[in-house]
Image (spheres, rainbow, N blue to C red):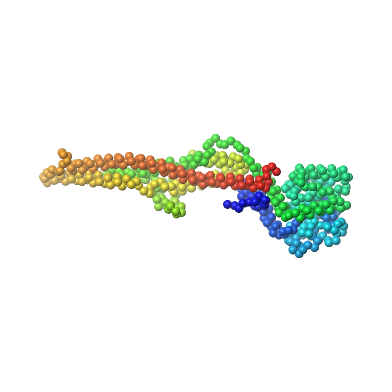
Amino acid sequence: MPDPISTADPLGVLARLVEVGEGLVPADLIDTGRALVERAGQRRLIAPGVGVVALLGATGSGKSSLFNAICGAELAPVAVTRPTSTQPIAALPTAPPPAVDSAVGRLLDWLGVHERVRIPETPSWGPSAVGVGPSTVLLDLPDVDSDVTRHRAVAERLAGLVDVLVWVLDPEKYADAVIHHDFIEPMAEHAAVSVVALNQVDRLSDRDREAATQDLTRLLAAEGMAGVDVIQVSARTGQGVPELRARIRAVADAEDVTHTRLCADARAWAALVRERIPQEGVDAPGPSADTSLEAVVQAAGRAIGVERIADAVGASMRLGAARRVGWLPARWVSRLRRDPLRAMHLGADVRGHRPAPDGPTPVVARTSLPAPDVAADAAMRVATEAYAASRTRQLPDAAREQATARLCEGAKQLYDQLDAAVARTDLEQAASPRWWAVANAAQVLTTLMALVGGAWLAVLYLMDRYLLLPVDPPRWGHVPWPTILLLAGLLGGLALAAAGTALARVGAARRRARARERLQRAVAEVVSTSVETPLEQELARYAEVSGLLDTLCPPSR
């Protein structure tokens, strides 16, 4: 049993989802989720307690100017005519403790940020409390809408790794589709670690500034970031920079902001999964055929030949009775007939393989049962598919098709398992009924009587014919005892044989019924193990995946 997953730990839920979602969640998303779990472990080990804040924006939004204003010094190059941030630049905190400085270095190496500058202790302008915190790094990233593919790729990669996202927008392009549709909207789950700055507000009148702010707030709310306030700033005049700096520090200094960011990544991943695998399937009407598990059991029983085997059990007992309780002079005829169970490699051939009461299940040789005919095989496959379709009707199409395909693939091995189950089934061939010994003794006795009577009569005939010594045998009334012995032996043997045969038929019918019941039970166990249990496991796995997705990304969201 897996350890319980705390719903308060989205990363634990994500790890479990990646583990159990194989085959249910699209492979590309499983790979993404697995990479996220691995990245989360690395991030928390590399630099715990150190945060990374990144400024993201489109060309001309003034990121670099705002970066310098927050740091209080000209650390990033600024140009009016073209973008200048072609590589990310990291502003390191002023005089951090050695442990923090070492952790910052490891973290930036992991992020792949090589251009690093130190925020000066004495800023060139602005208040003395510059930067975004004593253990927080500020990044200036390339433009997210850059025409240079590798510049945009760098921005996209780091946007997926940093702890706090500061979206820098300008009055002219604050509603630009690239930054909203490609970046902000997909990262709506990251609202708790996001800050939005409307830069260059000094270019607007008070009325236009408020209108732009309200419109941007509306856009953010429509994209799932209703709780994120828009901060009006001007990197050129310094307006709003202290407020922005304070807001960034508040978000970055929140308890375990790295964990918050990673949890947001987990929820965003879950939202993508939910889009790809809807949580509820179509309640389509079931197939017209019987869709119960019992229908599969019956079809499997017909395919493996339960009735044929049960008939062979009855015939085998009747044959055994003919050899043990039949009329002794005619038993040689029954010896010419082959035991039908032996023909199937059942019964006497597997007596030595019976399991001990507390011992392991023995290895049983294959039987010689004939392969199922085409009709029986098709009927079993149809019953299996109908059962699977009935049980998975509530699943989405992809999951239903996958579950049915897995089940039908496993059903290909069903005949081997059914064959082994039949071979292990006790068909009551190891012992004969006790009355057979008594009947056999009676048959031997009657035969001896007939032999004695016949021999006696033969001796009397030879003495009278060849020795001319007529001997008058003892009589019972008028009937000689030799004749009585001969007739009693013959007629008694025939009567005992007839009675024994009748009793054997009754016993054979009962044994046939018991064997049929055992065989049906064995077939049901195989079907349960090979059909029902895998399907239940698949349904349970999908239910767990759905529950974990609901934990990370509730349907109402």
The C terminus sits in image quarter: top right
Residue 417 coordinates in the image, percent (x, y): 48, 47
Q: Residue at x 59, y 52 (%)?
A: 2
Residue 232 coordinates in the image, percent (x, y): 84, 48
For this view, does 441 lie left or right of residue 102?
A: left
Residue 219 coordinates in the image, percent (x, y): 78, 43
Q: Residue at x 76, y 50 (%)?
A: 194
Q: Is residue 240 visible?
A: yes
Which quadrant holds residue 435?
A: top left
Pick whichever, 327 or 217, lies toward us.
Answer: 217
For this view, does 120 lie left or right of residue 106?
A: right
Q: Is residue 158 visible?
A: no
For this view, does 525 lie left or right of residue 337?
A: right
Which quadrant holds residue 74?
A: bottom right
Q: Residue at x 66, y 47 (%)?
A: 551
Pick whichever, 472 or 340, lies toward us.
Answer: 472
User: Is 87 rendered above or below residue 411?
Assistant: below
